[in-house]
């Protein structure tokens, strides 16, 4: 995840992959829905969140001059699990994260349960320093309601909106309106699925917008993510 102007690495999203002994490397669409059906998703989400938090701890030590956050996703089933809140609390406390952020990405589908319960959980998470991002913002009909009623820190503008940015004047105006709204409400903004220089330039006109996508990097294994941090360090010492 990059700041757009000047371009600078500011964070990572943790994305699950499964190296299946028979089928090789599998993308989330090939196993997350099944994991949700079977209930295994809670363990997977906990494992990935733990890795994200560990990475923050390690990088805080190794790259103290690069302020960055690491986000991870939670499925509805995980978020609704009664043990999820205490898991998050324990994980963050054990890691004693001080300056850097852990961001939890939630889709609106998750939040549909009881709004009061959801709000209580999110308030609690924010009390111990976690930031909340509303993932895939835009296409769902209730995104606005959640932004209004829940303690959200960031919105992640859905990739379909960025894909269609130049398809019509109306599309780009719509994204412009989302950005203006988020600015007015003091929400952070990440545009997802940035693939082209044109998209980058258009988005970079708004100083508050951050970007994520193949234009910057494909998803990479942990070791390569560290390589990106080394590059950032090398580049910044040149300045
Ligand atoms: P998401 O949270 O919307 O994640 C972004 C997806 O868009 C990722 O796909 C990422 O690789 C892809 N992406 C990012 N930039 C670009 C781009 O410029 N172009 C294109 N074509 N794609 C881009 P991925 O890794 O396949 O993940 C798919 C979905 O699986 C994620 O969507 C997320 O909802 C879910 N997921 C991934 N890891 C986890 C996890 O640990 N737990 C849970 N519950 N869900 C996960
Ligand atoms: Ca996400
Ligand atoms: Ca997303």
Image (tube, rainbow, N blue to C red):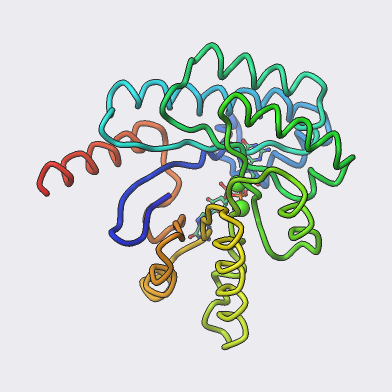
Residue at the farthest left position: 238
Viewer-proximal residue among 118 and 219: 118
- Give the image location of residue 185, x and y in percent: 61, 58
Rendering quarter of residue 83: top right
Up/down of 11 relative to 79, above or below: below
At 17% from the left edge and 46% from the top edge, which residue is drawn? 235
Name which residue lies at 44% across and 56% down.
210
Location of residue 133 by image quarter: top right
Q: Residue at the right extreme?
A: 114
The residue at the point 58 percent across, 31 percent down is: 130
Residue 186 percent across, percent down from the top left: 56, 54
Direction from residue 77 to residue 193 in the image, left or right: left
Lateral position of residue 166 relative to residue 147, left or right: left
Q: Position of residue 203 (x, y in %)?
A: 44, 69
Front residue (pair 67, 220): 67
| Count of marks overlaid on the render | 0
Tell me where residue 111 appears, x and y as whole percent.
Answer: 80, 44
The answer to whether 213 is drawn above or below residue 224 in the figure is: below
Q: Nearer the viewer, residue 215 or 79?
A: 79
Q: Residue furthest bottom?
A: 169
Q: Residue drawn at (36%, 71%), measured in percent from left and top? A: 197
Give the quarter of the image for residue 82: top right
């Amino acid at each position: 995840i990059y700041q757009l102007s000047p371009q600078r690495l500011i964070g990572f999203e943790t994305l699950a992959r499964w190296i299946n002994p028979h089928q090789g490397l599998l993308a989330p669409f090939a196993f997350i829905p099944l994991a949700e059906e079977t209930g295994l998703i809670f363990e997977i989400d906990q494992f990935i969140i733990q890795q994200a938090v560990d990475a923050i701890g390690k990088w805080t030590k190794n790259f103290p001059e690069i302020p960055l956050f690491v986000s991870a996703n939670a499925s509805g089933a995980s978020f609704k699990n009664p043990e999820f809140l205490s898991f998050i609390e324990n994980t963050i406390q054990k890691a004693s994260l001080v300056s850097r952020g852990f961001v939890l990405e939630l889709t609106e589908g998750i939040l549909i349960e009881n709004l009061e319960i959801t709000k209580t959980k999110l308030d609690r998470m924010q009390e111990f320093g976690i930031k909340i991002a509303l993932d895939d913002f835009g296409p769902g009909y209730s995104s606005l309601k959640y932004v209004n009623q829940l303690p959200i820190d960031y919105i992640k503008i859905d990739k379909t909106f960025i894909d269609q940015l130049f398809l019509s004047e109306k599309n780009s105006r719509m994204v412009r309106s989302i950005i203006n709204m988020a600015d007015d409400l003091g929400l952070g903004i990440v545009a997802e699925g940035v693939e082209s220089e044109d998209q980058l330039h258009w988005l970079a006109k708004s100083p508050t917008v951050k970007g994520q996508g193949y234009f910057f990097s494909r998803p990479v294994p942990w070791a390569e993510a560290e390589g990106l941090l080394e590059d950032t360090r090398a580049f910044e010492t040149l300045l």
